[in-house]
Image (cartoon, rainbow, N blue to C red):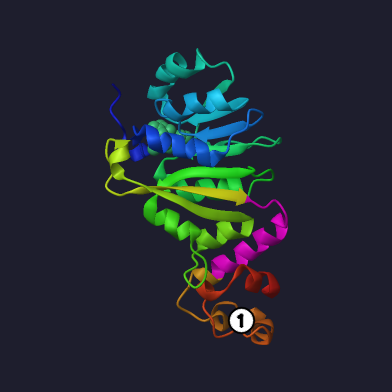
């Protein structure tokens, strides 16, 4: 048995019910190409291989590769295993869905990586930390850069809380399943909004009239000059740009 590395976010799923819920939420068709990040010992990968046409799975930990070959790759010919950092993975140019129990330390950059890709996934189904899941799915007035980023490129839904007892080794906090339906329209505009919003969020206690002074006239005309970034809706940002 391989010793789990905390630094790589290794909390392996051991609860069959949670596994089934992830698969059900992923809504996998027999024609789908699934991209999985962090197969670990391959529990989810095997089930994805049974339901989808093709699975691409990306694992950073070299120690797990031989085991994955024995338990998954040799048995399921529709699975491709890549040994690399998922953040350097170039997403496919054809339709695909992401389904994964991800290493939590890269939740935000990973969402960035896929949501802002030239060809984003059709859907993203993830197991993430419960607190982060709430943040991702929260809209105004408690918007964060993370929730804005997700809302600009898709619609996130909080599916279900998952107890820390569902993992080995047991993490300190609970997790949750989230599902994101992406919206491939307006990518360029969304990227511009994000750039502007990041400036405002870097000083989130300040009013927009202070953080975005070059837009003062527009802010006043939209009645947003006295507001803080977390209070703006997606529609407000769109009007502002
Ligand atoms: N999917 C498995 C499961 O449900 O039991 C393992 C999940 S575990 C939370 C996260 C996995 O991601 C680990 O196998 C870890 O080695 C891998 N990992 C960590 N950082 C990674 C990265 N940057 N790119 C790809 N895989 C990574």
- When asked about the image quadrant of residue 38, the answer is top left
Q: Position of residue 202 (x, y in %)?
A: 49, 69
Segment colored magenta: 182-199
Residue 124: % across, % down: 56, 44
Magenta: main secondary structure: helix
Q: Is residue 83 visible?
A: no
Would residue 118 appear left or right of 40 to someone viewing this image? right
Q: Is mark 1 within 8 Å of ligand 1?
A: no
Q: Nearer the viewer, residue 23 or 42?
A: 23
Of the 4 image quadrants, the one containing the C terminus is bottom right
- Residue at (72%, 58%) from the top-left corner? 186
Image side of residue 14 versus residue 183, left or right: left
Q: Residue at x 64, y 31 (%)?
A: 32
The spot of residue 49 in percent (x, y) is 54, 24
- Residue lying at 65% horizontally and 87% vertically, measured from the top left: 220
User: Does dot 1 land on a helix, a strand or a loop?
Assistant: helix
Examine the image and state in which quarter residue 13 appears: top left
- Is 183 magenta? The answer is yes
Identify the residue under disc 1.
Answer: 213
Residue 138 in magenta? no
* Viewer-side residue, 83 vs 10: 10
Report ligand 1 position as a quadrant: top left
Between 64 and 199, the one lying in front of the other is 64
Number of marks present in the image shown: 1
The image shows residue 50 at horizontal and vertical percentages of 54, 23
| Residue 126 sits above or below residue 221 on the image | above
Q: Is residue 135 left or right of residue 186?
A: left
Badge 1: how crowded within 10 Å, few (<14), some, or many (20+)? few
């Amino acid at each position: 048995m391989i010793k789990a590395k905390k630094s790589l976010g290794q909390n392996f799923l051991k609860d069959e019910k949670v596994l089934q819920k992830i698969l059900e939420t992923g809504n996998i068709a027999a024609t789908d190409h699934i991209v999985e990040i962090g197969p670990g010992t391959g529990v989810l990968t095997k089930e994805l291989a049974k339901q989808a046409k093709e699975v691409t799975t990306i694992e950073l930990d070299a120690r797990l590769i031989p085991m994955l070959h024995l338990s998954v790759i040799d048995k399921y010919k529709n699975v491709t295993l890549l040994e690399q950092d998922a953040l350097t993975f170039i997403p496919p140019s054809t339709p695909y869905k992401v389904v994964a129990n991800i290493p939590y330390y890269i939740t935000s950059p990973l969402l960035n990586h896929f949501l802002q890709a030239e060809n984003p996934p059709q859907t993203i189904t993830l197991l993430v930390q419960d607190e982060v899941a709430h943040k991702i799915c929260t809209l105004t007035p408690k918007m964060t850069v993370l929730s804005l980023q997700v809302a600009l490129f898709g619609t996130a839904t909080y599916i279900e809380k998952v107890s820390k007892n569902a993992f080995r080794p047991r993490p300190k906090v609970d997790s949750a399943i989230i599902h994101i339906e992406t919206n491939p329209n307006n990518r360029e505009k969304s990227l511009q909004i994000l750039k502007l919003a990041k400036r405002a969020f870097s000083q989130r206690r300040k009013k927009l009239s202070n953080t975005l002074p070059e837009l003062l006239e527009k802010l006043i005309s939209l009645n947003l000059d006295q507001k803080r970034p977390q209070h703006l809706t997606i529609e407000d940002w769109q009007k502002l740009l």
